[in-house]
Protein backbone atom coordinates (compact mmCIF):
# COMPACT_ATOMS: atom_id res chain seq x y z
CA UNK A 1 0.00 0.00 0.00
CA UNK A 2 1.20 3.52 -0.79
CA UNK A 3 1.66 5.97 2.07
CA UNK A 4 1.27 9.70 2.52
CA UNK A 5 0.71 12.41 5.08
CA UNK A 6 -1.81 15.22 5.55
CA UNK A 7 -1.23 18.27 7.73
CA UNK A 8 -2.59 21.74 8.40
CA UNK A 9 -1.15 24.48 6.19
CA UNK A 10 1.30 26.60 8.16
CA UNK A 11 4.66 28.36 7.76
CA UNK A 12 7.43 25.79 7.45
CA UNK A 13 5.15 23.11 6.03
CA UNK A 14 7.53 22.77 3.10
CA UNK A 15 10.17 21.33 5.45
CA UNK A 16 7.78 18.50 6.29
CA UNK A 17 7.14 17.92 2.59
CA UNK A 18 10.88 17.62 1.96
CA UNK A 19 11.20 15.11 4.79
CA UNK A 20 8.22 13.12 3.50
CA UNK A 21 9.87 12.96 0.08
CA UNK A 22 13.17 11.83 1.61
CA UNK A 23 11.32 9.04 3.43
CA UNK A 24 9.82 7.81 0.16
CA UNK A 25 6.21 8.69 0.95
CA UNK A 26 3.96 8.93 -2.10
CA UNK A 27 2.01 12.10 -1.32
CA UNK A 28 1.84 15.15 0.92
CA UNK A 29 -1.52 16.88 1.52
CA UNK A 30 -2.82 19.95 3.30
CA UNK A 31 -6.35 20.71 4.47
CA UNK A 32 -8.55 23.42 2.97
CA UNK A 33 -10.34 24.80 6.05
CA UNK A 34 -10.01 28.59 5.76
CA UNK A 35 -11.10 29.68 9.25
CA UNK A 36 -8.99 27.04 11.00
CA UNK A 37 -5.85 26.45 8.94
CA UNK A 38 -3.61 28.37 6.56
CA UNK A 39 -4.24 28.57 2.81
CA UNK A 40 -3.50 25.31 0.97
CA UNK A 41 -2.50 26.96 -2.30
CA UNK A 42 0.11 29.10 -0.57
CA UNK A 43 1.41 26.09 1.40
CA UNK A 44 1.58 23.77 -1.60
CA UNK A 45 3.33 26.42 -3.68
CA UNK A 46 6.14 26.35 -1.13
CA UNK A 47 6.10 22.56 -1.13
CA UNK A 48 6.19 22.44 -4.94
CA UNK A 49 9.33 24.57 -5.05
CA UNK A 50 11.04 22.57 -2.29
CA UNK A 51 10.36 19.06 -3.67
CA UNK A 52 10.76 17.24 -6.97
CA UNK A 53 8.95 13.90 -6.76
CA UNK A 54 6.30 13.68 -4.06
CA UNK A 55 2.71 14.28 -5.11
CA UNK A 56 0.93 17.26 -3.54
CA UNK A 57 -2.73 17.18 -2.56
CA UNK A 58 -5.49 19.46 -1.31
CA UNK A 59 -7.84 17.63 1.01
CA UNK A 60 -10.45 18.87 0.24
CA UNK A 61 -11.79 21.97 -1.46
CA UNK A 62 -15.44 22.62 -2.21
CA UNK A 63 -17.88 24.67 -4.31
CA UNK A 64 -19.12 26.01 -0.99
CA UNK A 65 -15.69 27.61 -0.50
CA UNK A 66 -14.42 28.57 -3.93
CA UNK A 67 -15.78 29.22 -7.40
CA UNK A 68 -14.71 26.80 -10.11
CA UNK A 69 -12.69 29.46 -12.02
CA UNK A 70 -10.80 30.50 -8.88
CA UNK A 71 -10.12 26.92 -7.76
CA UNK A 72 -9.07 25.85 -11.28
CA UNK A 73 -6.67 28.79 -11.54
CA UNK A 74 -5.07 27.83 -8.23
CA UNK A 75 -4.77 24.18 -9.25
CA UNK A 76 -3.40 24.88 -12.72
CA UNK A 77 -0.92 27.35 -11.20
CA UNK A 78 0.29 24.65 -8.80
CA UNK A 79 0.50 22.29 -11.75
CA UNK A 80 2.86 24.74 -13.44
CA UNK A 81 5.11 24.58 -10.37
CA UNK A 82 4.89 20.78 -9.94
CA UNK A 83 3.84 19.35 -13.33
CA UNK A 84 1.75 16.19 -13.02
CA UNK A 85 2.16 16.01 -9.23
CA UNK A 86 -1.07 17.69 -8.12
CA UNK A 87 -4.04 15.92 -6.51
CA UNK A 88 -7.26 17.78 -5.80
CA UNK A 89 -9.76 16.46 -3.32
CA UNK A 90 -13.28 17.85 -3.70
CA UNK A 91 -16.17 17.59 -1.28
CA UNK A 92 -19.35 19.19 -0.01
CA UNK A 93 -17.39 21.33 2.43
CA UNK A 94 -18.53 19.60 5.60
CA UNK A 95 -15.86 20.81 8.02
CA UNK A 96 -14.96 24.02 6.21
CA UNK A 97 -18.61 25.07 6.11
CA UNK A 98 -19.36 24.06 9.69
CA UNK A 99 -16.48 26.17 10.97
CA UNK A 100 -18.39 29.11 9.43
CA UNK A 101 -21.62 28.09 11.13
CA UNK A 102 -23.02 27.00 7.76
CA UNK A 103 -24.08 23.70 6.24
CA UNK A 104 -22.39 21.69 3.48
CA UNK A 105 -23.50 21.92 -0.13
CA UNK A 106 -25.29 19.20 -2.13
CA UNK A 107 -24.01 16.24 -4.10
CA UNK A 108 -25.39 17.78 -7.30
CA UNK A 109 -23.44 20.99 -6.80
CA UNK A 110 -20.35 18.96 -5.93
CA UNK A 111 -20.66 17.02 -9.19
CA UNK A 112 -21.04 20.18 -11.28
CA UNK A 113 -18.02 21.70 -9.54
CA UNK A 114 -15.91 18.59 -10.13
CA UNK A 115 -16.86 18.49 -13.81
CA UNK A 116 -15.97 22.17 -14.22
CA UNK A 117 -12.58 21.70 -12.56
CA UNK A 118 -11.82 18.67 -14.71
CA UNK A 119 -12.66 20.59 -17.87
CA UNK A 120 -10.82 23.78 -16.99
CA UNK A 121 -7.71 22.05 -15.67
CA UNK A 122 -7.51 20.01 -18.89
CA UNK A 123 -7.71 23.14 -21.04
CA UNK A 124 -11.32 22.62 -22.10
CA UNK A 125 -14.19 25.07 -21.91
CA UNK A 126 -16.95 24.56 -19.37
CA UNK A 127 -20.33 26.01 -18.53
CA UNK A 128 -20.29 28.63 -15.78
CA UNK A 129 -23.48 29.89 -14.16
CA UNK A 130 -24.29 32.83 -11.90
CA UNK A 131 -28.02 33.05 -11.27
CA UNK A 132 -29.78 33.07 -14.64
CA UNK A 133 -26.66 34.00 -16.59
CA UNK A 134 -24.73 31.13 -18.19
CA UNK A 135 -21.48 31.47 -20.10
CA UNK A 136 -18.87 29.14 -21.57
CA UNK A 137 -15.51 29.86 -19.98
CA UNK A 138 -11.95 28.60 -20.43
CA UNK A 139 -8.43 29.65 -19.54
CA UNK A 140 -7.39 32.66 -21.59
CA UNK A 141 -3.85 32.74 -20.23
CA UNK A 142 -2.09 29.40 -20.61
CA UNK A 143 1.58 29.12 -21.54
CA UNK A 144 3.80 30.14 -18.60
CA UNK A 145 0.86 31.12 -16.41
CA UNK A 146 -0.91 27.80 -15.83
CA UNK A 147 -0.34 24.18 -16.80
CA UNK A 148 -3.29 22.43 -18.46
CA UNK A 149 -1.17 19.84 -20.28
CA UNK A 150 -0.12 17.61 -17.38
CA UNK A 151 -3.05 15.80 -15.72
CA UNK A 152 -4.34 16.62 -12.25
CA UNK A 153 -5.77 13.73 -10.23
CA UNK A 154 -9.20 14.34 -8.67
CA UNK A 155 -10.70 12.49 -5.71
CA UNK A 156 -14.16 12.92 -4.17
CA UNK A 157 -14.64 12.99 -0.40
CA UNK A 158 -16.87 10.09 0.60
CA UNK A 159 -18.77 11.76 3.45
CA UNK A 160 -22.10 11.30 1.63
CA UNK A 161 -21.44 7.60 1.22
CA UNK A 162 -23.07 6.14 -1.92
CA UNK A 163 -23.98 9.60 -3.27
CA UNK A 164 -20.36 10.74 -3.21
CA UNK A 165 -19.17 7.41 -4.58
CA UNK A 166 -21.64 7.76 -7.46
CA UNK A 167 -20.23 11.22 -8.24
CA UNK A 168 -16.76 9.68 -8.32
CA UNK A 169 -17.97 6.93 -10.65
CA UNK A 170 -19.65 9.31 -13.09
CA UNK A 171 -16.68 11.68 -13.12
CA UNK A 172 -14.01 8.98 -13.21
CA UNK A 173 -12.31 10.12 -10.01
CA UNK A 174 -10.92 8.44 -6.94
CA UNK A 175 -12.27 8.56 -3.37
CA UNK A 176 -10.97 9.91 -0.09
CA UNK A 177 -12.38 9.53 3.41
CA UNK A 178 -11.34 10.37 6.97
CA UNK A 179 -11.34 7.72 9.66
CA UNK A 180 -13.20 5.14 7.57
CA UNK A 181 -11.35 1.97 8.50
CA UNK A 182 -14.19 -0.52 7.96
CA UNK A 183 -13.36 -2.73 4.94
CA UNK A 184 -17.07 -3.56 4.48
CA UNK A 185 -17.90 0.13 4.12
CA UNK A 186 -15.16 0.53 1.52
CA UNK A 187 -16.48 -2.44 -0.48
CA UNK A 188 -19.88 -0.72 -0.55
CA UNK A 189 -18.34 2.59 -1.71
CA UNK A 190 -16.39 0.89 -4.47
CA UNK A 191 -19.50 -0.98 -5.62
CA UNK A 192 -21.44 2.30 -5.78
CA UNK A 193 -18.65 3.98 -7.73
CA UNK A 194 -18.38 1.08 -10.16
CA UNK A 195 -22.15 0.90 -10.77
CA UNK A 196 -22.33 4.65 -11.42
CA UNK A 197 -19.40 4.43 -13.84
CA UNK A 198 -21.02 1.56 -15.73
CA UNK A 199 -24.26 3.50 -16.05
CA UNK A 200 -22.54 6.61 -17.41
CA UNK A 201 -22.55 6.93 -21.23
CA UNK A 202 -19.09 6.76 -22.74
CA UNK A 203 -17.66 10.16 -23.60
CA UNK A 204 -15.12 10.19 -26.47
CA UNK A 205 -13.34 12.99 -24.58
CA UNK A 206 -13.13 10.77 -21.52
CA UNK A 207 -12.49 12.35 -18.14
CA UNK A 208 -11.59 9.02 -16.51
CA UNK A 209 -8.19 9.15 -14.79
CA UNK A 210 -6.30 5.88 -14.84
CA UNK A 211 -4.55 6.96 -11.62
CA UNK A 212 -7.81 7.43 -9.71
CA UNK A 213 -7.39 5.66 -6.40
CA UNK A 214 -8.85 5.40 -2.92
CA UNK A 215 -7.28 7.23 0.02
CA UNK A 216 -8.05 6.91 3.71
CA UNK A 217 -6.96 9.49 6.28
CA UNK A 218 -6.27 8.27 9.80
CA UNK A 219 -3.75 8.47 12.62
CA UNK A 220 -1.30 5.77 13.56
CA UNK A 221 0.23 4.81 16.89
CA UNK A 222 2.63 1.89 17.14
CA UNK A 223 2.56 0.50 20.65
CA UNK A 224 5.72 -0.12 22.63
CA UNK A 225 6.05 -3.45 24.41
CA UNK A 226 3.39 -3.76 27.15
CA UNK A 227 2.05 -0.25 26.39
CA UNK A 228 -1.58 0.44 27.22
CA UNK A 229 -3.43 0.82 23.89
CA UNK A 230 -5.66 3.43 25.51
CA UNK A 231 -3.04 5.25 27.57
CA UNK A 232 -2.13 8.91 27.29
CA UNK A 233 0.38 8.54 24.41
CA UNK A 234 -2.18 6.67 22.30
CA UNK A 235 -4.93 9.17 23.18
CA UNK A 236 -2.67 12.09 22.30
CA UNK A 237 -1.79 10.55 18.93
CA UNK A 238 -5.39 9.81 17.97
CA UNK A 239 -7.40 12.34 19.95
CA UNK A 240 -7.65 14.91 17.15
CA UNK A 241 -9.68 12.48 15.04
CA UNK A 242 -11.91 11.47 17.94
CA UNK A 243 -12.51 15.11 18.87
CA UNK A 244 -13.37 15.92 15.25
CA UNK A 245 -16.12 13.30 15.31
CA UNK A 246 -17.40 14.52 18.67
CA UNK A 247 -17.47 18.11 17.39
CA UNK A 248 -19.43 16.99 14.34
CA UNK A 249 -21.87 15.12 16.58
CA UNK A 250 -22.20 18.13 18.89
CA UNK A 251 -22.99 20.26 15.82
CA UNK A 252 -25.36 17.67 14.30
CA UNK A 253 -27.99 16.34 16.75
CA UNK A 254 -29.36 13.84 14.21
CA UNK A 255 -25.93 12.19 14.00
CA UNK A 256 -25.40 12.38 17.75
CA UNK A 257 -28.66 10.48 18.22
CA UNK A 258 -27.18 7.51 16.33
CA UNK A 259 -24.26 7.14 18.74
CA UNK A 260 -24.14 4.75 21.65
CA UNK A 261 -24.75 5.85 25.25
CA UNK A 262 -21.08 6.31 26.12
CA UNK A 263 -20.36 8.30 22.96
CA UNK A 264 -23.50 10.38 23.45
CA UNK A 265 -22.39 11.23 26.97
CA UNK A 266 -18.98 12.33 25.60
CA UNK A 267 -20.78 14.69 23.21
CA UNK A 268 -22.75 16.17 26.11
CA UNK A 269 -19.56 16.64 28.14
CA UNK A 270 -17.87 18.32 25.17
CA UNK A 271 -20.74 20.80 24.80
CA UNK A 272 -20.69 21.57 28.50
CA UNK A 273 -16.92 21.95 28.50
CA UNK A 274 -17.02 24.36 25.57
CA UNK A 275 -19.88 26.35 27.09
CA UNK A 276 -22.33 25.92 24.23
CA UNK A 277 -25.25 23.83 23.01
CA UNK A 278 -26.06 21.92 19.83
CA UNK A 279 -28.47 24.66 18.75
CA UNK A 280 -26.58 27.82 19.78
CA UNK A 281 -26.08 30.02 16.70
CA UNK A 282 -22.45 30.68 17.64
CA UNK A 283 -21.55 27.08 18.55
CA UNK A 284 -19.06 26.89 15.67
CA UNK A 285 -16.89 29.46 17.47
CA UNK A 286 -16.73 27.20 20.53
CA UNK A 287 -16.43 23.75 18.95
CA UNK A 288 -13.83 24.21 16.23
CA UNK A 289 -10.86 26.17 17.64
CA UNK A 290 -7.71 24.02 17.34
CA UNK A 291 -9.66 21.68 15.05
CA UNK A 292 -7.50 18.66 14.11
CA UNK A 293 -4.71 19.97 16.30
CA UNK A 294 -3.10 18.24 19.26
CA UNK A 295 -5.66 17.84 22.03
CA UNK A 296 -5.34 19.42 25.47
CA UNK A 297 -4.54 17.02 28.34
CA UNK A 298 -7.83 17.88 30.09
CA UNK A 299 -9.75 16.51 27.06
CA UNK A 300 -8.14 13.07 27.13
CA UNK A 301 -11.16 11.62 28.94
CA UNK A 302 -13.27 12.37 25.83
CA UNK A 303 -11.03 10.19 23.67
CA UNK A 304 -13.03 7.01 24.13
CA UNK A 305 -11.42 3.64 23.33
CA UNK A 306 -14.40 2.73 21.14
CA UNK A 307 -13.83 5.79 18.95
CA UNK A 308 -10.05 5.35 18.91
CA UNK A 309 -10.51 1.82 17.60
CA UNK A 310 -13.01 2.96 14.97
CA UNK A 311 -11.15 5.98 13.60
CA UNK A 312 -7.44 5.25 14.11
CA UNK A 313 -4.81 2.57 13.84
CA UNK A 314 -3.41 1.71 17.26
CA UNK A 315 -1.62 -1.53 18.02
CA UNK A 316 1.48 -3.64 17.74
CA UNK A 317 3.25 -3.91 14.39
CA UNK A 318 1.40 -7.17 13.66
CA UNK A 319 -1.95 -5.63 14.67
CA UNK A 320 -1.43 -2.65 12.37
CA UNK A 321 -0.26 -4.72 9.42
CA UNK A 322 -3.31 -6.99 9.77
CA UNK A 323 -5.71 -4.02 9.66
CA UNK A 324 -3.82 -2.34 6.82
CA UNK A 325 -3.85 -5.56 4.79
CA UNK A 326 -7.63 -5.79 5.23
CA UNK A 327 -7.99 -2.22 3.98
CA UNK A 328 -5.77 -2.96 1.00
CA UNK A 329 -7.91 -5.97 0.16
CA UNK A 330 -10.97 -3.68 0.31
CA UNK A 331 -9.45 -1.53 -2.43
CA UNK A 332 -7.61 1.18 -0.48
CA UNK A 333 -4.60 2.36 -2.48
CA UNK A 334 -3.03 4.81 -0.07
CA UNK A 335 -2.91 5.31 3.68
CA UNK A 336 -2.64 8.96 4.75
CA UNK A 337 -1.78 9.79 8.33
CA UNK A 338 -2.18 13.13 10.08
CA UNK A 339 0.67 13.49 12.59
CA UNK A 340 0.21 15.90 15.50
CA UNK A 341 2.73 14.93 18.19
CA UNK A 342 6.07 14.76 16.34
CA UNK A 343 5.43 14.81 12.57
CA UNK A 344 8.96 13.84 11.39
CA UNK A 345 9.07 10.88 13.77
CA UNK A 346 5.53 9.78 12.95
CA UNK A 347 6.22 9.98 9.21
CA UNK A 348 9.36 7.88 9.66
CA UNK A 349 7.37 5.35 11.66
CA UNK A 350 4.82 5.07 8.85
CA UNK A 351 7.52 4.67 6.20
CA UNK A 352 9.29 1.97 8.22
CA UNK A 353 6.05 0.11 9.00
CA UNK A 354 5.12 -0.35 5.35
CA UNK A 355 8.59 -0.79 3.87
Image (cartoon, grey):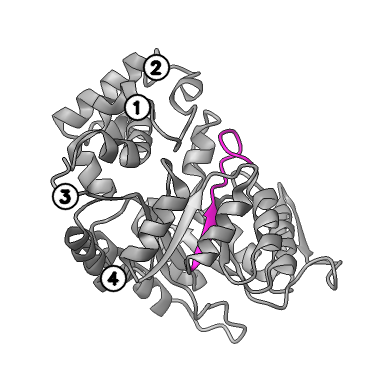
Q: Quick one: label 3 or label 4, which is nearer the N terminus?
A: 3
What element does badge 3 sit on? loop
N-term-proximal mark, 3 vs 1? 3
The quarter of the image holding the N terminus is bottom left
Highlighted magenta segment, given as a residue range: 26-38
Give percent across and percent down for residue 330. 26, 70
Q: Quadrant of residue 268?
A: top left
Which mark is first along the chain, 2 or 4? Answer: 2
Where disc 1 sits, the SS reads helix
Cα distance between the residues tagged 3 and 1: 36 Å
Mark 3 vs mark 2: in front: 3
Q: Which residue is mark 1?
A: 250
In percent of width and height, residue 264 lies at 22, 27
Q: Is residue 134 magenta?
A: no
For the point 49% across and 18% down, the residue is 281
Identify residue for label 2: 274
Q: Point out the frontmost of discs 3 and 4.
A: 3
Q: What residue would you read off at disc 3?
A: 225
Q: CA distance from mark 4 to mark 2?
A: 38 Å
Amino acid sequence: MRTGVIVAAHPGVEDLAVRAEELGLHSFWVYDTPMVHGDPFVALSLCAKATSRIRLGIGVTSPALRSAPAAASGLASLNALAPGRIICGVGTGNTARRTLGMRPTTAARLENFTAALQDLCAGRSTEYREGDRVRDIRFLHTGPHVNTADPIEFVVAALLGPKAAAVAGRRGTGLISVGLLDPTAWHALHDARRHAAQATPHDPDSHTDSRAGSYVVTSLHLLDEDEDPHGDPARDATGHLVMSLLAFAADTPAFAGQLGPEEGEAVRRLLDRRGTTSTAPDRHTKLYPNYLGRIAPHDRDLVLPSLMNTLALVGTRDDLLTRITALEQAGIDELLIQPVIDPPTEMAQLAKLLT
